[in-house]
Amino acid sequence: MNELAPRPNNLDAFWMPFTNNRGYKAGPRMLARAEGMFYYSNDNREILDGTAGLWCVNAGHGRREITEAIQRQAATMDFAPTFQMGHPIAFAAAAKVAERTPPGLDRIFFTNSGSESADTALKIALAYQRARGEAQRVRLIGRERGYHGVGFGGMSVGGIGVNRKQFGALLPYVDHLPATHAPEHQAFSRGQPEYGAHFADALEALVALHGDTIAAVMVEPLAGSTGVLVPPKGYLERLRAICDKHNILLIFDEVITGFGRLGTNFGAERLGVVPDIITMAKGLTNAAVPMGAVAVHDRIFRAIVDAAPAGIELFHGYTYSGHPLAAAAAIAACDLHTAEDLPGRARAMEPAFEDAAHALKGLPNVIDIRTMGLVAGIELAPRAGKPAERGMRVFHRCFDAGVLVRVTADIVALSPPLIVEKPHIERLFGTLAAAIQAEAA
């Protein structure tokens, strides 16, 4: 057993992200170590991980194969630049990723996070349209209730109001599609709801409004951070067709849905729609080292590179693009996904996971349940005048009972590691059911 981490005696210095800092530091919850399906608190309490960390530890915690790959690489070479230089492991990692992406999307640009991947994809889309002689295409389209990280590009095309309102007007030339969620027609759907393909037609209206100034549309195939919104049947297919009709690039943000979460390497495969660009992060390295990537169709890469004058073709990148330690972690994580067929394990566990989630129907204040792959969203009725309070209290009750869940306002989101077994599912949903019942008032 690993030695427990020391308890910090000063919580002031760390400004915590997406956190009620005042509330947290008045009653902190600390995770000290992790292994397999579990975290362990400072007092060695076992906490079942119902969220794969933050949608990212798909192969489970503490995987020796990834740890040893990082250690070997750190002992060999800790860092090397990738500006006008190269190191073999970055190229090897890109090839591993390209083995898993849809056919044609085999040009891999490395970043350090999903946020950086989103901004990179948007910049590539703008560069592509300029390279093909359509420099007027400067407009970027997102979707209401979309989440694409916290860079100014991703935040601008994103559609979560509380993430935007502190920061002013953001990028110009951005518009949004409507969200696909219609609970009056879709409540308690298993998998893709039957209703809602027509929401994609709003893109035709935006084309009529903006003309040939639209460069790209960015959507999550399944929206996670906004509360698990599963795409309606036919929606993504219709969006793809409209983009093709008007020479608009389609970008899938697969930071959450990539690397097995929906039972396939990427959500594009599960949903049967191939975009032009895919963003990824999280499961790419099993979260052992921060890393993101953008998979780009070869024709986009060729258009930008072949049209450029001699020298640098794309003036974009990060000091840590293709970082050696992250590349080592990515290769090891990809190899684990293949050796253990983690997407296949997700498919095998999906029916039990789905049944357990929908068994919560009928509990007090449960107004909707949405599931696909190993993702579930359980929406609770908010308390009058106190939005998000019920969800946060359920979160606290679950944690105190030894289960980690995630809440977005009054929506409980579940996304366990893909190594989850039926006893874990029973404990996860049993604990959640008890917490929901305890908050019935």
Image (cartoon, rainbow, N blue to C red):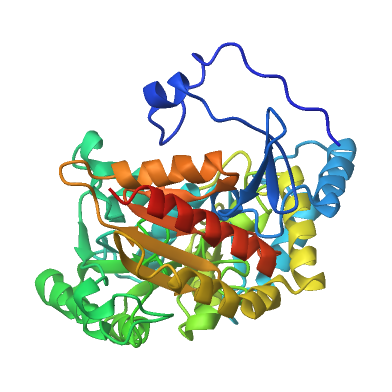
Residue at the farthest left position: 209
Q: Residue at x 45, y 59 (%)?
A: 121
Q: Residue 421: where, in percent of width, then height?
A: 70, 67
Could you tell me how many numbered marks the image carries? 0
Seen in the image, is 88 located left or right of residue 9?
Answer: right
Q: Is residue 353 above or below residue 25?
A: below
Q: Residue at x 52, y 57 (%)?
A: 313
Q: Nearer the viewer, residue 1 or 57?
A: 1
Seen in the image, is 156 located left or right of residue 288?
Answer: left
Hey, which quadrant is residue 427 in on the image? bottom right
Residue 150 appears anywhere in the view: no
Q: Is residue 250 above or below residue 311?
A: below
Q: Residue at x 63, y 16 (%)?
A: 8
Q: Residue 325: where, in percent of width, then height?
A: 76, 44
Q: Is residue 169 above or below residue 63?
A: above
Q: Nearer the viewer, residue 367 or 309?
A: 367
Seen in the image, is 13 located left or right of residue 140?
Answer: right
Residue 338 appears anywhere in the view: yes
Q: Residue 249: where, in percent of width, then height?
A: 37, 73
Hey, which quadrant is residue 222 in on the image? bottom left
Q: Nearer the viewer, residue 121 or 193?
A: 193
Q: Nearer the viewer, residue 154 or 56?
A: 56
Q: Quadrant of the N terminus?
A: top right
Q: Residue 237: where, in percent of width, then height?
A: 36, 86
Q: Residue at x 67, y 49 (%)?
A: 322
Seen in the image, is 244 located left or right of residue 322?
Answer: left
